[in-house]
Amino acid sequence: MSKSNIEWTEVTWNPTTGCDKVSAGCKICYAEVLTKRLKAMGQPKYQNGFKITLHEEELKRPYGWNKPCMVFVNSMSDLFHKDVPLEFIQKVFKTMNETPHITYQVLTKRAERVAELSKFLTWSDNIWMGVSVEDERVMDRIDHLKMTNAKIKFLSLEPLIGPLPNLNLDGIHWVICGGESGHGRRPIDPEWAREIRDNCLASNVSFFMKQMDKKIPIPDDLFIRQYPTIINNQLKSQKLTNMKATTKNLAKQEIVATLSPFKKEIGEALINGENPETLAIRLAEKRAMPVPTAQAYITMVRKLFDKLETEPTKIEQKEMPIQELVTSNAVKKESDVQHIIIDAQEGVATTIKFEITINLKNK
């Protein structure tokens, strides 16, 4: 099991590796860059470089995962690449079908092939199917996604390199939005993301803001990280829970902004979910310091974060229209949103009821 630093998943699983570029979103491909590094390090799985390679031995791996988790399938490839035979795709689906306690997130840029092969695949409830859409030139991928039999359909609007004013979210359950990272990255306009966020709210679709890029923090009003919720085998997008962690990350970001550059680097890595032990090793190599020294600095930052868990709080009940919510200082500045429930009228979300936990020390 490979723990992931990708914000919207927990684990990555790569039954295939390798790919090639099909559109503008592929220009700065992190998988291609990482593959070169892994090959140079002598990793057997990547000795074919970025050429499509099937890994039969990987098909057995999920059967050993006993705990429920969220798994991104083929972070280093595309399962629906033309060079991946239908028979192998069916084997991957068989593994996913037979491990229902695991949620699989499959993402592709080859949406046309997904639609073509959908009838030959068994779409169990634990398989979420998504397509990448970086700008308006590839909006047709969404139409192909809607033709599949996947129970949960999602969009990865990343790297977002242009506005999507005509985004039709009918039949879509989840939207991930993010800017590009890496050398030569193309900037994201926050207004593009805000337009998508508002579209999701109006369409009753869960919204997850992944990043602006790795160097620019997410604006407070965009720091929303929701997941589609399944209740009794039915999607209940209007009930959005577990927002507490999201707003605590906002508070952690405020702490990080006051730290020295080295501690700031540690804080940002912890917020992004990097394992402290892995982080200590990485920092020790990068800074040429002993691992225990790196661990000591990490402990200092974690203690600052831990104080957020012990602040006295009180609960207030509020209700306001959506447009007031997204610009509300009470929510983005000093509250810890515990849960949000969207009331829908004829499919259009108009009002949000929510609870907030307010720090008494700030009052």
Image (cartoon, helix red, strand yellow):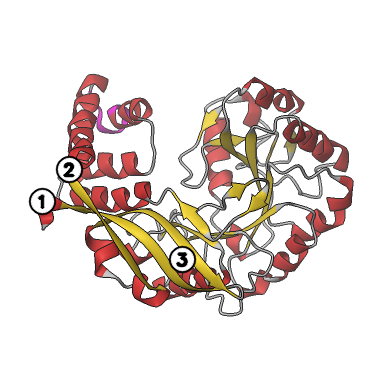
Residue behind mark 3? 186
Magenta portion: prevailing SS class: helix
Q: Residues within 10 Å of mark 1 (few under 14, many from 20)?
A: few
Q: Are marks 1 and 2 in contact (CB under 8 Å)?
A: yes
Q: Position of residue 232 (x, y in %)?
A: 65, 45
Residue visible at 29% across and 63% down?
331
Front: mark 1 or 3: 1
Q: Earlier in the sequence, mark 1 or mark 2?
A: 2
Residue 350 covered by magenta stretch: no
Relative placement, left or right, of 330 versus 140 is left
> Distance between the Cα atoms at labels 1 and 2?
8 Å
Residue stretch rendered in magenta on the structure:
284-289
Give x and y (percent) for residue 193: 46, 69
Three-letter code, disc 1: Lys
Identify residue for label 2: 311
| Circle 2 crowding by C-alpha within 10 Å: few under 14, some 14–19, many from 20 | few
Q: State left or right for residue 44 relative to residue 189.
A: right
Q: Is residue 184 visible?
A: no
Q: What residue is shown with label 1?
A: 361
Q: Residue at x 48, y 65 (%)?
A: 342
> In what quadrant of the picture does the C terminus appear?
bottom left
Which of the marked residues, 1 or 3, is nearer the chain's N terminus?
A: 3
Q: Residue at x 22, y 36 (%)?
A: 306
Instruction: Tell me the quarter of the image containing the N terminus.
Output: top right
